[in-house]
Image: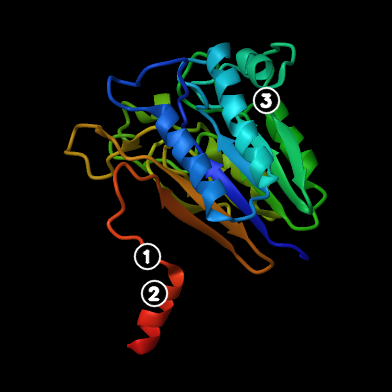
Amino acid sequence: MAASYSLLHLTDVHAVPEGLLHGSADPWAGLTAALDSAVASGTTFDAIVLSGDNTDSGDEVSYRLLGQAVDAAAERLGARVVYAAGNHDARGALRAGLFGQAPTTEPYDHVVLVGGLRLVVLDTSAPGRHHGELDDAQLAWLAERLAEPAADGTVLVMHHPPLGGLTPGFDDPRLSPHIDLREPDRLAEVVRGSDVRLVLAGHTHSAAAGQFAGVPVWVGPGSAYAADPLSPAGVITAVPFQACTKVEITATDVRTVLVPLRQGPPVYQLPLQQLVSHLSEH
């Protein structure tokens, strides 16, 4: 592996034409804060990866507005943009609103090459439903792609994580069949032993990490709002916390760092040199 890569991972943006989500969550504030923070950081990002639920209702207007905002930031960052489809997305409107393509409804599976790094995007959405699924054709397509390793490995991007029970209540037997990715073992058979170095997912609105078929999995936090991982028993609670992820892929490892998006003034903010001087003195 000759190169290192930085990715800005956003998920569950839930863009709307206007207004708030659930009366209080502002999806545009989260998206804007994430993109502005990436630009202000001075980091060179190779790609902005959005792993599904890009809009809340799958309407073409929201996709157009989202695309304009993300493309503007990507241009400033010199980054590629990679979208995956989630259960709140609509394949036809996604294609039309983001890319001006024909609004076809086949799964939005595709490959994006960023230097020697391959990003393989799998569409886990089941139109009209909230659970995730992959059919035989999609798994065969993935196996064909992974048959030949990429120079710097592969990142698999999907909305529904291949791990269940990441948010309280989501592992309840009454709910999980309607929420989780179905038959993840079939995907594991394709991924195991391949050059996939990381799986990026979303869906649960709760940052989490795990391992699947020997591969690290990072489930990103929602940029619109968060699910409370310690919600009271029998209750699923959404809280006004917005975040994204900075992903670093090097020759030897993969790192994911949660980036909180400020809702108020910082607790403290000081020049880096001042901190270096302080630490050097102690």
Q: Amino acid at mark 1?
A: Leu
Where is residue 243 shown, x and y percent of the image? 41, 43
Within 10 Å of disc 2 (Cα), the crowding (few <14, some 14-19, many 20+) is few
Residue at x 41% of width, y 32% of height: 29
Q: Is residue 203 visible?
A: no
Where is residue 129 shown, x and y percent of the image? 47, 17
Q: Is 121 situated left or right of 126 in this image?
A: right
Instruction: Indicate whether 221 appears above or below 141.
Output: below
Q: Is 166 situated left or right of 133 in this image?
A: left
Q: Amino acid at mark 3?
A: Tyr
Instruction: Indicate whether 270 appears above or below 281.
Output: above
Q: Secondary structure at mark 3?
A: loop
Farthest-out residue, bottom: 281
Q: Secondary structure at mark 2?
A: helix
Residue on which disc 2 sits: 275
Query: Observer-nearest residue: 115 or 128?
Result: 115
Q: Quadrant of residue 104?
A: top right
Q: Is 153 situated left or right of 247 in this image?
A: right
Give the numbered dot on residue 270. Answer: 1
Q: Is 69 situated left or right of 75 in this image?
A: left
Where is residue 202 shown, x and y percent of the image? 48, 38
Q: Are marks 1 and 2 in contact (CB under 8 Å)?
A: yes
Q: Quadrant of residue 16?
A: top left
Where is residue 103 shown, x and y percent of the image? 69, 11
Residue on which disc 3 sits: 108
